[in-house]
Image (cartoon, grey):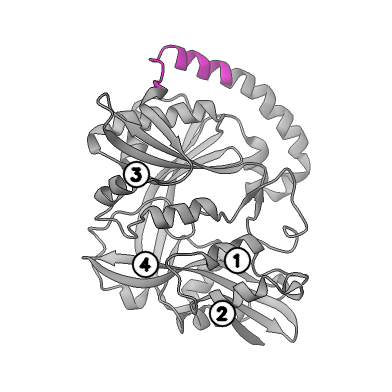
Amino acid sequence: MKIQPYTVNDLKEKLQQNSFWNTPVLPITRHRALSHIHNPRADRDDVVLFVAYDNDSIIGYFGVLPDKIYLHDVEYKIAWGSTIWVDPRLRGSTIGRSLLLAAFKHHDICSSGFTRSGKMVADASGKFSTLRESEGTAFIVRSCCSFLLPKQFPKLRRLRPALEVMDKIMNKFVDLRLFLWKKNKPRYRTDHIEFITEIDEQTDHFIRQQSRKELSRRTAQELNWIIKFPWILSAPRADNTSARYFFSSISKRFLYLNVKVFDETDSMIGFIMFKVKDNTMNIPFAYFNKTAINDIASLIVFMMFEMKIDIFVTYHIDIMYKIRELNFPCLYKKDLSLLYYISNKLKDYDFSSRNFQDGEGDSVFT
């Protein structure tokens, strides 16, 4: 087995080499590679992909996302673990651990939640410590059995058409219930919001004021990069890349919606980045004055109605409790937990004063 590291510059070169993309297994997609190439926090010689080869066959890979975090105004270069895959025929081997150890030679690795197999590899490596556990809520707004049940019980995938019919029937009643709830509430005033396609100077200034205690301190430069170079593309069906790449690359609906919020005097009081993947919505980044929480919660509910969202997920404590206070008519609520892991080299640092956004690491992209 040989582990081949690929830097940002290497990926730029590989974009022009068809042989790299014509393999039975793809370790990365072209649009993810483009995102890495344009990452404003990555250096040209940063390694972003580690691929395990058996002769010319890919038997595993580990992708990372270079980033910076801030502790007491000191900047630290890290990389977030992103994708880790090992050929199913070789599960139980040391390939995953070898990939992880190869990455640690180049980066201090952190993670905003591992997959089950990824967590097993991480635990076996002995290189990680738990940074924090964030509590969240999934608000199930509309019936989506055809989405949730096959994920929980893979054998039900063949019943998806029948489950879709059941969802449509149930949602006739759900939509009526939502309509009646909305009818008894004040109409949302859209003259107090502005949709933007990129982070402008006013928004950047507002974010910088709000993000001083943040772990990763995003600015217009990073947020515009995220908007311009997504890891998931909107398309009606999976393409030939999807069958060879074992992580998210295509969704029927994937978009970012960036919203500025103003008060009665036209002063900016908030900025929210919404991410919609199919019929699931979350908020990777939220910046707002504490006194504006009612306006922010009203905006979120408005977006759920307008976008016909089935599931809204948040780990933002203020948003989570305010939505609960509104008695929004969900079908049910599910408590969630998200573990953050950090390299043992950084485990003794004090992170207690740092604010975490839902979009930390690669979460904003996936």
Residue under the image location 73 percent in, 44 percent down:
156
Label 2 to label 4, Cα distance in Å?
Answer: 22 Å
Tell me the kind of residue under disc 4.
Lys
Tell me the kind of residue under disc 2.
Leu
Q: Are marks 1 and 4 in contact (CB under 8 Å)?
A: no
Q: Which residues are magenta?
A: 175-189
Residue at the spot of label 1: 33
Label 1 to label 2, Cα distance in Å?
Answer: 19 Å
SS of the residue under disc 4: strand
Q: Are marks 2 and 4 in contact (CB under 8 Å)?
A: no
Can you tell which mark lies on residue 99? 2
To which quarter of the image does residue 190 belong?
top left
- Residue 33 in the image, given as x and y percentages of width and height: 60, 66
Q: Quadrant of the N terminus?
A: bottom right
Residue under the image location 72 percent in, 34 percent down:
163
Query: Relative to 289, is 298 above or below?
Result: above
Q: Earlier in the sequence, mark 1 or mark 2?
A: 1
Q: Earlier in the sequence, mark 3 or mark 2?
A: 2
Residue at the spot of label 4: 68
- Residue 225 in the image, given as x and y percentages of width and height: 48, 56
In magenta segment, residue 173: no
Residue under the image location 40 percent in, 15 percent down:
185
Residue at the spot of label 3: 203
Q: Are marks 3 and 2 in contact (CB under 8 Å)?
A: no
To which quarter of the image does residue 26 belong?
bottom right
Could one spot residue 316 in this view of the protein? Answer: no
Tell me the kind of residue under disc 3.
Thr
Label 3 to label 2, Cα distance in Å?
Answer: 40 Å
Can you tell which mark lies on residue 238? none
